[in-house]
Amino acid sequence: MTTGPASESGGAPAARPGSRRLPPERGSGAVIDVHVHLLPGLDDGPETLEESLELARALSTEGVTRAVATPHCVRGGAYDPTPERIRSGVAQLRAALQEAGIALEIHPGAEVALEPDLYGLLASGRYLTLAETGRYLLLELPADEIPPYTKRVVFDCLVHGVVPVLAHVERNRAIARDPNQLWDLVERGALAQVNASSVASSDPAVQRLVRTLLKHDLAHLVASDAHHASRRPPRWRAAMAVLRDWVGDRRAVELTVEIPAAIVEGRPVPEPNPQRVRSASPVRRVMGWLRRGVDATLRA
């Protein structure tokens, strides 16, 4: 991946200098969750403060020590909290966590919906970056596509020193059909986040996609995207077990502790080395179908 001055046609600015490895984070068994819907009454997450506390307890029980509260921010939509409301919600929840004895450090942030003039709105103070460091922005793509202006938005953010962190990329149907569409954005300098629930999914196709993204350095951190203690729970324990099996202990810690810690603290993260995903040849696809058919017959 190239570094240096950015250009819209390709190449990323030196927004994330650093070696491929981060120094080990102290307390490296403690997960840091940079995408969780934790604040009450701001979006489709908890409706009450008590539900927020239940989700905070679930996060703490599953090993999370720090979390960024990231309510949906969709300009003109049903969920569009101002930075002041988010900061106020974080202050209220911090006080409640202390009173309840829940050891969870929380920071303000937002999950911002993609739009053409996103950087202009960010620069005007309309949206919060993750932990308000000014360095990383959690950016949600549309569910069905990657709009043509996405590369320009990523470019605009990067040339101003803000790294887009693309939320739950495995849920985008265009990326699911062709992961190389994500390669274009990562090559330019974006980071990509996948959900813990997708890592631990019971759907083989979802797990296969997530594993492909990790293998090709097209996913760089895991977060819960939890919305509720029971309806959309964190699932960190299950995800960590799967991650360790897929990528080993060292990489699992990098994905869930070290890179998220750097994001929360506004530090550089290792520069990804994204690889294109090769499409299976027609012969290999047919052989795969035949093999699955034989396996199904043998299990019957």
Image (cartoon, rainbow, N blue to C red):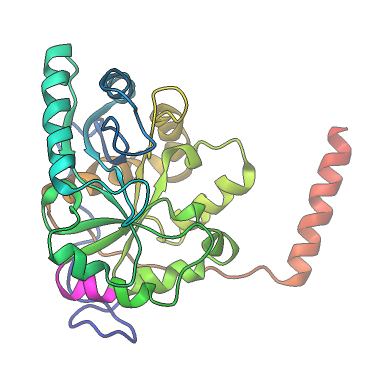
Q: Nearer the viewer, residue 213 or 76?
A: 76
Residue at image coords 60%, 63%: 177
Q: Quadrant of the N terminus?
A: bottom left
Give the percent coordinates (x, y) of residue 77. 37, 52
Main secondary structure of the magenta stretch = helix
Total labels drawn: 0
Q: Nearer the viewer, residue 104 or 205?
A: 104
Splitting the image into 4 quarters, where does residue 298 fall?
top right
What residue do we see at 32% from left, 46% from top? Answer: 255
Residue at 22% across, 69% down? 119
Q: Is residue 18 visible?
A: no
In the image: residue 81, left or right of residue 285: left
The location of residue 104, given as percent across then percent down, is 19, 26
**Left or right: where does residue 131 sit relative to residue 141?**
left
Magenta range: 155-161
* Location of residue 25 in the rendering, given as x and y in whole percent from the top left corner: 17, 40
Which is nearer the eye, 236 or 153?
A: 153
Q: Is residue 47 visible?
A: yes
In this rendering, the answer to whether 70 lies above or below 192 is: above
157 magenta-colored:
yes
The verdict on residue 210 being magenta is no
| 234 in relation to 214, above or below | above
Q: Position of residue 30 (x, y in %)?
A: 24, 30
In the displayed structure image, the side of residue 232 where residue 174 appears, left or right: right
Instruction: Please give the name of the residue rendered at 52% of the width and 56% of the height, measured from the top-left corner.
Output: 212
Quadrant location, the C terminus:
top right
Q: Residue furthest top?
A: 100
Please give left or right for residue 80 compared with residue 298 in the image: left
Q: Which quarter of the picture shows residue 71?
A: top left
Quarter of the rendering containing residue 55: top left
